[in-house]
Amino acid sequence: MAVGAVDDARPDRWGERVIQFIEKPSRLSLMEYLYFAGDDRFGALGVSTAKDEYLPQRNGPLPRMENAQFLSEVIAKINGKEPITDLERRMVAAGGSFGGAKPKALIEIDGAQWVIKFFNNEPIDAPLIEHASMTLASQAGISVAETRLVPLLGENAIAIRRFDRDGTRRIHCLSAGTALRALVTAGDTPDLGYPNLAQLLRRAGNTAHGENKREMVELFRRMVFNILMDNTDDHEKNHALLLAPEPTPVRQGRPRRPTPPGARLRRVTFKLRARAAGVRRWCGRSGINLVERNVAVQIVRIIAS
Ligand SMILES: Nc1ncnc2c1ncn2[C@@H]1O[C@H](COP(=O)(O)OP(=O)(O)O)[C@@H](O)[C@H]1O
Ligand SMILES: [Mg+2]
């Protein structure tokens, strides 16, 4: 783990593999990984080889949606440690080392950067389920990054619009883990739970128009959603804090209610209702006072309806 925010800027397990395979640096220290990740890395930090001049690793243009099938085949080759051609190398050199543990890359859609996550031989269609979960989250009033299902030959991939870019502008971001670790003295164990993250939002968040309070409510809603969905990958690196360039206007409008469930969805809804009771009990026990209890109940109702 690298120090502070640098840890969020370095490539993760997947990116390290790609860099080892594509760039073949003679040394494999954090410095090489940071450098070769290039300016398309997560967040806004940049890495230069000179101190007086900004000299980052320059990667070529990102592949486009129409290259998705080809890109998935190259990624599969890298995953299987098979040799790749020069053309294939160029295809992944730009954006192939993006964060996380599983195979992914960056692509460009209509001038914007998107993360494309490929099927990783899971026993389930993980990209399809991720797309469905994100859609459901959006219908439950949670603000999520736009996703698209990318059907490929015999499998699916999912494309997620980058939330840390605004056109070509890089937005400063921290993972929740980094932000929460910064609260304790080095060496002490941080508390990485939701209540602490909510407190951090209240104290350090954007207070203009009560934005931080709105975000605490949003965080609570995310927590409830993750419990209801049985998200087993809900950890501190999977939450991000973005630096707002200027106060964002308060969003009016109530969360949209999901469309009425059809026959197949009714079973799922029934299960969620049963879980909602568990969430209510859990909130009571954990003493999580992010929002008024009645708001909590309302959120559970929105999601379980
Ligand atoms: N849409 C996105 N915009 C910006 N960064 C993203 C996006 N999706 C993922 N990331 C970054 O990539 C990392 C890995 O993504 P994630 O979806 O968690 O994949 P994995 O399942 O491999 O961990 C995240 O922790 C985050 O830093
Ligand atoms: Mg992750």
Image (cartoon, rainbow, N blue to C red):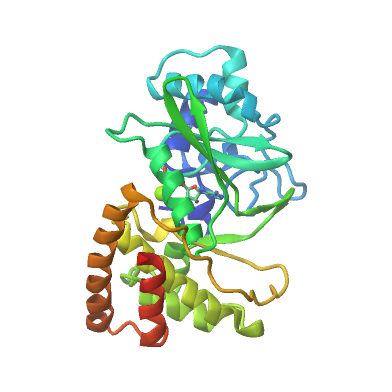
Relative to residue 258, is residue 185 depicted above or below? Answer: below
Relative to residue 26, is residue 166 depicted above or below? Answer: below
Query: Which residue is the extreme one toward the right?
Result: 53
Q: Indicate the quadrant containing the C terminus: top left, top right, bottom left or bottom right.
A: bottom left
> In terms of image quadrants, where is residue 260?
bottom left
Relative to residue 201, is residue 144 depicted above or below? Answer: above
On the image, the x and y values in percent for residue 265 come to: 34, 51
Direction from residue 40 to residue 229 in the image, left or right: left
On the image, the x and y values in percent for residue 43 come to: 60, 54
**Is residue 28 among the parts visible in the rendering?**
no
**Is residue 18 among the parts visible in the rendering?**
yes
Direction from residue 59 to residue 82 in the image, left or right: left
Number of disc labels: 0
Q: Report the front residue among 302 and 3.
A: 302
- Residue appearing at x 32%, y 29% in the figure: 121
Q: Report the front residue among 167 and 58.
A: 167
- Residue appearing at x 31%, y 55% in the figure: 266
On the image, the x and y values in percent for residue 276 come to: 28, 70
Q: Report the front residue among 164 and 31.
A: 164
Q: Report the front residue among 219 and 263.
A: 263
Direction from residue 52 to residue 204 in the image, left or right: left
On the image, the x and y values in percent for residue 181 come to: 41, 68
- Residue appearing at x 61%, y 74% in the figure: 253
